[in-house]
Image: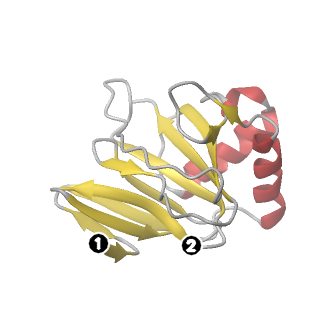
């Protein structure tokens, strides 16, 4: 397996951004999201429903701050928080290749004490990204990825899909 901070996998551009939100705002986003975490049928681990940006004005504001920091101009279509720890870890390979979705998707690390980023699969190889707390990674919606299954400490991440 290969680890990286920023780079390309074939035609799939992957970018990492750091220092996304002030700690106070990051914790507000985590705490508001944590209130809505649940086991959702057909989805791995604990998640919120993908309408987090519609639930609270403050969440919408903070999610849009993340969007601006990762330099995506398109409006937020879906947003949700994933929670993982050593009791609630999983591997669920998927992509976001839907016709109404913008070319890139984003994962923001709200709290990630182990700096374990998203895993990607391309040409039967697994690539492990590094994403510390308060960083974000953007990547092609066509790229297969998963939450890393070896997380042991509480990890909160925010996934965002954008309108085309």
Rendered image: mark on residue 1: 1
Q: Find residue 107 and report its horizontal and vertical position in percent.
A: 52, 52
Q: Which of the pair 130/58 is nearer the observer?
A: 130
Q: Where is the N terminus found, in terms of image quarters?
A: bottom left
Q: Which of the pair 9/74 is nearer the observer?
A: 9
Numbered-mark total? 2
In the drawing, does residue 85 fall left or right of residue 89? right
Q: Find residue 137 and report its horizontal and vertical position in percent.
A: 47, 59
Q: Residue at x 59, y 42 (%)?
A: 45
Q: Find residue 67 and report its horizontal and vertical position in percent.
A: 56, 48
Which colour style is shown? Answer: secondary structure
Q: Which of the pair 62/121 is nearer the observer?
A: 121
Q: CA distance from mark 2 to mark 1?
A: 16 Å
In the drawing, does residue 43 fall left or right of residue 56? left
Q: Residue at x 57, y 24 (%)?
A: 41
Q: Residues within 10 Å of mark 2 (few under 14, many from 20)?
A: some
- Name the residue carrying label 2: 115
In the drawing, does residue 4 fall left or right of residue 71? left
Q: Which of the pair 136/111 is nearer the observer?
A: 111
Q: Residues within 10 Å of mark 1 (few under 14, many from 20)?
A: few
Q: Where is the C terminus found, in terms of image quarters?
A: top left
* Vertical comparison of 151 with 87: above or below: below
Nearer the observer, disc 2 or disc 1? 1
Indicate the quadrant where residue 37 lies.
top right
Q: Residue at x 36, y 40 (%)?
A: 94
Under circle 2, the secondary element is loop
Q: Find residue 14 and report its horizontal and vertical position in percent.
A: 34, 61
* Vertical comparison of 68 with 61: above or below: below
Closer to the chain start, of discs 2 and 1, is: 1
For the residues labelled 2 and 1, say whether their Cβ atoms are less than 8 Å apart.
no
């Amino acid at each position: 397996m290969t680890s990286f901070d920023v780079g390309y996998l074939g035609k799939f551009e992957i970018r990492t951004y750091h220092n996304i939100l002030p700690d106070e705002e990051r914790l507000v986003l985590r705490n508001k999201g944590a209130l809505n975490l649940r086991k959702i049928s057909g989805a791995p681990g604990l998640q919120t429903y993908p309408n987090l940006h519609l639930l609270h004005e403050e969440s919408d504001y903070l999610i849009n701050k993340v969007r601006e920091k990762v330099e995506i101009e398109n409006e937020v279509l879906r947003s949700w928080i994933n929670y993982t720890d050593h009791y609630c870890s999983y591997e669920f390979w998927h992509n976001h290749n839907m016709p109404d979705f913008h070319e890139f998707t984003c994962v923001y690390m709200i709290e990630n004490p182990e700096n374990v980023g998203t895993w990607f699969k391309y040409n039967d190889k697994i690539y492990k990204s590094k994403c510390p707390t308060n960083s974000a990674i953007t990547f092609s919606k066509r790229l297969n990825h998963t939450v890393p299954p070896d997380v042991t400490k509480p990890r909160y991440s925010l996934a965002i899909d954008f309108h085309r």
